C-alpha cells in the first residue's frame, strides 16, 4: 500500500493554502451576472489559454489517458492532437462570431439562428452532460486516487468533500475565481506530469531505443487499423473532429473562457495557447502509460496506472506534488463545470421566464444553483464505479449524444435555407437514432466503433434536417435568422494571427507524423 511522508503532506497542505489565498484575492463580495458568469469580459490570452488547458486536463484525463495507453496504446492521444486542430479552427472562424455577438451562453447562438426551443434543448443537454459526465467523472477519478493513498477514505464521502471545496469558491467568486485558480492549477499539472514522465522514462535510461524495444510496437502507433477495438483510423478521421468540435466550441464548460475574453484577439490567442499545450499530453501522460505496460504488467484495472506510477516511482515530496497536481485537476474541472452549468441554468431558463429580475438577484440565484448542482454531481459520482472504465464511460456517452448537436450547429453556420422546424425535428430524430444505436451497441447488435458511429450519426442528422426542410409546408428561415450565424462579424483576426494559426496546425500534423 503506497504511503506518504511528512514532506508530501506539507506539499499538499501548501497547495491547498495557496488555492484558498488566491480565491480570497480574486473573489468579489457581490459580483453581478457579467462578473459571475463571464469575469466582466476582461480575460486576457494567457489566463484563457491556461484555464482552457487546466479545465480540460482534468482528473479524468490524468487517470484516463495513462490507463487507456496502458491498455491499448498511444492512439488515445489522437483525442489530444485533434483537439489542438479544433481549437485552431475555432480561433480562426468561430471566435470572431461569438465575440462579435456578445453572447453569454453558446445555446444563444441557436436561438438567434433558429428558435428559443433549440436554445433550451441544447442548454438542457449541456446541463445534463456537464453534471453527469464532466463534474461527476472528475470527482470519481479524483476519489479513486485519493483512496489509494488514504485507504480509510470511502468513495461517496471523498467525492462529496471535493465537490464542497470546489463548489464553495466557485459560487463565491464566479468565473474569475475559476480562471485564476486554473492558471495556478495548470502550472502544477504541467510540473507534476513532467516530473512523473521523466521518472518513468528514467526507468528506460532515457533511451527511446530502449522504450521501442521493450514496449509492444502496436502500443506506440497513433494510427490504428480499421478493426482496432480502441480507436480505428476511420474513427479518428470522422468521429474525433465532431467530438472535439462539441467539446471545444459548443460546450459551455469550455467555451465560457472564450466568451469572457476582453476582445476577439485575446480569445483567439488564448485558444492558440491551449492548442499548443494540447500537444504535451502525448509526452507527459500517454507515453508513461504505454511504458507502464513493461513496468506494471499485472494491474487489475487500467484506471490505477497513474496512482501506481506515483506510488512506485515518485520519491518523497514529489508524490505530494503529484497528488497536488491531481487535486488541481479535480478542482479545475469541477469549478469549471459548476460555473458553466449555473450560467446555463440562469441565463437560458431563469432569466427568460423572469425578464425583470435584477442582475444582482440573478447572480444570487446563480450562486445557490451552483451549490445545488454540486450536490447532484457528488451524489451521482459514486455510481460511475458500476461502469467498466472511466474513459469509456466518458467518450462513449459523448459519441452518441453530441453528433446531432454538432450537425444542427453546422447547418446553422453554413446554410441559410434551413428553418427552425426542420432543425428542431431533425435534431430530435437524430437523438432518437443515437438512442437506438446506443441500445443496439449495449446488446452487441451493433459492433461499429463508437467514433465511427459518431460520424454516421452526424451525417444522418444532417440528412434528416435537409429531408424535413424539403417537405411541403415546412417553414423557411427568415432573412434575419439566416444571417444570424453566417453573417460577417465586425471582429476579424488580422492576417498575421491567421498565419500563426496555420503554422501551429502544421506543427501539430508534424508531431502526428512522427508517431504515425
Image (cartoon, grey):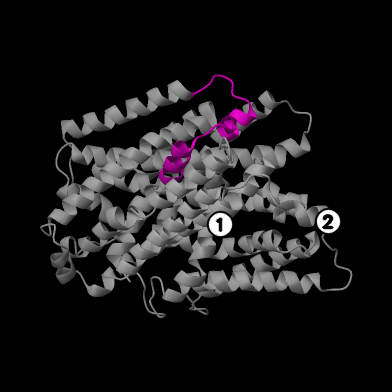
Q: Residue 351's spot in the image, x, y percent? A: 73, 36
- The residue identified by callout 1 is 246
Q: Residues within 10 Å of mark 1 (few under 14, many from 20)?
A: many
Asked where in the image residue 3 lies, by quadrant, the reply is top left
Is residue 193 within the magenta segment?
Answer: no
Q: Answer left or right for 294 relative to 17.
A: left
Query: 231 or 149: nearer the eye?
Result: 231
Q: How many marks?
A: 2
Q: Residue 93's spot in the image, x, y percent? A: 59, 54
Q: Residue 507's spot in the image, x, y percent? A: 38, 59
Query: 446 or 219: nearer the eye?
Result: 219
- Local secondary structure at mark 1: helix
Q: Answer left or right for 434 relative to 195.
A: right
> Measuring 28% from the left and 53% from the top, which residue is drawn there?
284
- The residue identified by callout 2 is 479
Residue numbers of the magenta segment: 27-54
Is residue 42 within the magenta segment?
Answer: yes
Residue with the most extreme right position: 473
Q: Answer left or right for 267 relative to 311.
A: right
Residue with the most extreme top position: 29
- Local secondary structure at mark 2: helix
Location of the C terminus (image quadrant): bottom left
Q: Residue 233's spot in the image, x, y percent? A: 42, 75
Q: CA distance from mark 2 to mark 1?
A: 27 Å
Asked where in the image residue 156 lies, by quadrant, the reply is top left
Of mark 2 and mark 1, the one earlier in the sequence is: 1
Q: Is residue 280 visible?
A: yes
Amino acid at each position: 500500500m503506497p504511503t506518504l511522508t511528512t514532506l508530501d503532506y506539507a506539499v499538499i497542505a501548501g497547495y491547498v493554502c495557496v488555492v484558498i489565498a488566491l480565491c480570497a484575492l480574486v473573489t468579489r463580495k457581490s459580483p453581478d451576472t457579467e462578473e459571475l458568469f463571464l469575469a466582466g469580459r476582461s480575460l486576457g490570452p494567457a489566463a484563457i489559454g491556461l484555464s482552457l488547458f487546466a479545465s480540460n486536463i482534468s482528473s479524468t484525463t490524468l487517470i484516463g489517458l495513462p490507463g487507456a495507453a496502458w491498455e491499448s496504446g498511444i492512439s488515445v492521444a489522437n483525442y489530444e492532437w485533434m483537439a489542438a486542430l479544433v481549437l485552431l479552427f475555432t480561433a480562426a472562424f468561430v471566435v470572431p462570431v461569438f465575440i462579435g455577438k456578445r453572447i453569454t451562453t453558446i445555446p444563444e447562438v441557436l436561438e438567434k439562428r433558429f428558435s428559443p426551443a433549440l436554445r433550451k434543448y441544447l442548454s438542457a443537454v449541456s446541463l445534463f452532460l456537464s453534471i453527469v459526465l464532466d463534474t461527476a467523472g472528475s470527482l470519481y477519478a479524483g476519489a479513486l486516487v485519493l483512496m489509494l493513498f488514504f485507504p480509510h477514505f470511502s468513495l461517496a464521502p471523498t467525492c462529496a468533500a471535493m465537490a464542497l471545496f470546489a463548489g464553495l469558491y466557485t459560487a463565491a467568486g464566479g468565473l474569475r475565481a475559476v480562471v485564476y485558480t486554473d492558471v495556478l492549477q495548470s502550472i502544477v499539472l504541467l510540473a507534476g506530469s513532467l516530473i512523473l514522465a521523466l521518472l518513468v522514462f528514467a526507468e528506460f535510461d532515457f533511451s527511446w531505443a530502449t522504450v521501442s524495444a521493450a514496449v509492444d510496437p502496436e502500443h506506440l502507433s497513433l494510427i490504428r487499423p480499421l478493426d482496432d477495438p480502441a480507436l480505428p483510423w476511420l474513427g479518428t478521421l470522422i468521429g474525433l473532429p465532431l467530438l472535439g468540435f462539441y467539446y471545444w466550441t459548443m460546450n459551455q464548460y469550455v467555451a465560457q473562457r472564450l466568451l469572457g475574453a476582453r476582445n476577439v484577439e485575446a480569445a483567439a490567442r488564448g485558444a492558440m495557447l491551449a492548442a499548443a499545450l494540447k500537444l504535451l499530453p502525448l509526452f507527459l501522460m500517454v507515453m508513461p502509460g504505454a511504458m507502464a505496460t513493461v513496468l506494471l504488467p499485472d494491474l487489475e484495472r487500467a484506471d490505477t496506472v497513474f496512482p501506481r506510477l506515483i506510488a512506485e516511482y515518485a520519491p518523497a515530496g514529489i508524490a505530494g506534488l503529484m497528488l497536488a497536481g491531481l487535486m488541481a485537476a479535480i478542482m479545475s474541472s469541477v469549478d469549471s463545470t459548476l460555473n458553466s452549468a449555473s450560467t446555463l441554468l440562469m441565463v437560458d431558463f431563469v432569466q427568460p421566464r423572469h425578464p425583470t429580475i435584477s442582475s444582482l438577484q440573478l447572480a444570487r440565484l446563480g450562486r445557490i444553483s451552483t451549490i445545488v448542482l454540486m450536490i447532484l454531481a457528488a451524489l451521482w459520482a459514486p455510481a460511475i464505479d458500476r461502469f467498466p472504465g472511466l474513459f469509456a464511460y466518458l467518450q462513449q456517452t459523448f459519441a452518441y449524444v453530441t453528433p446531432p448537436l454538432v450537425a444542427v450547429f453546422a447547418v446553422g453556420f453554413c446554410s441559410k435555407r434551413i428553418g427552425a422546424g426542420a432543425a428542431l425535428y431533425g435534431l430530435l430524430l437524430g437523438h432518437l437514432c443515437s438512442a437506438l444505436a446506443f441500445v443496439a451497441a449495449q446488446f452487441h447488435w451493433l459492433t461499429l466503433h463508437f467514433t465511427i458511429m459518431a460520424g454516421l450519426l452526424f451525417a444522418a442528422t444532417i440528412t434528416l434536417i435537409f429531408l424535413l426542410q424539403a417537405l411541403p409546408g415546412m417553414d423557411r428561415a427568415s432573412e434575419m435568422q439566416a444571417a444570424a450565424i453566417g453573417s460577417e462579424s465586425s471582429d476579424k483576426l488580422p492576417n498575421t494571427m491567421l498565419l500563426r494559426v496555420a503554422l501551429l496546425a502544421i506543427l501539430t500534423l508534424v508531431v502526428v507524423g512522427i508517431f504515425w
